[in-house]
Amino acid sequence: MAISNETVATLRRAAAGGDGEAARELGRLLCLLRVGPEHDPDDPAVIQAWPEEPWLRAAVRARPDDTLAATLLAGRLVQQVAFWRIDPYFAEGQGENDTTLARRRDEARELYARVLRARPDDPAALAGTACLDALFDEDRELPEFSEPYSYYELNLQLWSGSFCHTEMVITTDLDELRWAYHQMLRPFADDGPPDDPTLETFIDGEKTDFVVLSGGVGLDAVTIPPLTGTLLPAGHPVQEGLAHYGYSCDWG
């Protein structure tokens, strides 16, 4: 089903009315974005909005047994820890420090533990826990995941001299990919992105297709192979834990 701003608005109305499943689905979709559709993507005050967090929290409160909601929230908390640890000086200026990161760590660990009590073999919770442990243990390497998954990886690199800001979206659904791509390009609506986005297709962990989206061409203008094999579970990390399902970014 095609995703639109009305799709999001409908889910938001239902979630605001107390529908826990709608809150989870809204949060899952918003995991794919840096900022929500209602935010100005050019607002310098909105560095990383984490628009999914309040809705995933609402879903976890409304549906304590919903392991997907708990896994998604835990995964985003792990992503927040990784994001704020890129540049500790910048993080400190935004009010982030060892205490706030430890709070996220402890909450994510409790959420993953809740999932694993219900589903001891849950792959996303097991992999997420391993990534979380590695983030806080300098002697531990980021894990390699034994199960090869299939997914799409959308990348946009923005260079300024030797500085590179990279945005990435990981998903397994083509309609959601198209919607996330449109949202990613909102800041460049007038002139197109300064650098060409790329789309990679992974089948059972192996890159099988690479497309350069020249000038930000629409995804309908390119051939995107369907995913086969085992789809990446929502909330699961990829690339030895450097990114998760959904949106992530890096700079350096």
Image (cartoon, grey):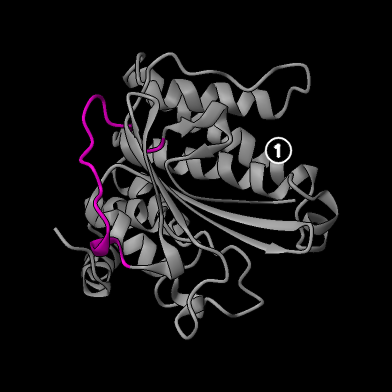
Vertical relation: 131 (above or below) 56: above
Badge 1: how crowded within 10 Å, few (<14), some, or many (20+)?
Answer: few
Q: Residue at x 37, y 61 (%)?
A: 180
* Quadrant (top left, top right, bottom left, bottom right) of the N terminus: bottom left
Viewer-proximal residue among 248 and 208: 208
Task: Give how far across and how far down residue 9 sits, in percent.
Answer: 26, 73
6 with respect to 199 (left or right): left
Whether 81 is drawn above or below 89: the answer is above
The image quarter in which residue 15 lies: bottom left
Q: What secondary structure is the magenta-colored segment mainly?
A: loop
Give 127 or 167, whichever is nearer the viewer: 167
What residue sits right under mark 1 in the picture? 102
Q: Position of residue 110 (x, y in %)?
A: 52, 30
Q: Nearer the viewer, residue 121 or 217?
A: 217
Q: State the image coordinates of residue 100 (x, y, percent, origin top left).
A: 71, 47
Counting labels gives: 1
Residue situated furthest left in the rendering: 1
Q: What amino acid is found at the position of numbered circle 1 in the picture?
A: Ala
Look at the image and give the residue range highlighted in magenta: 218-235
Residue 168, image x, y percentages? 50, 51
View extreme (bottom): residue: 190
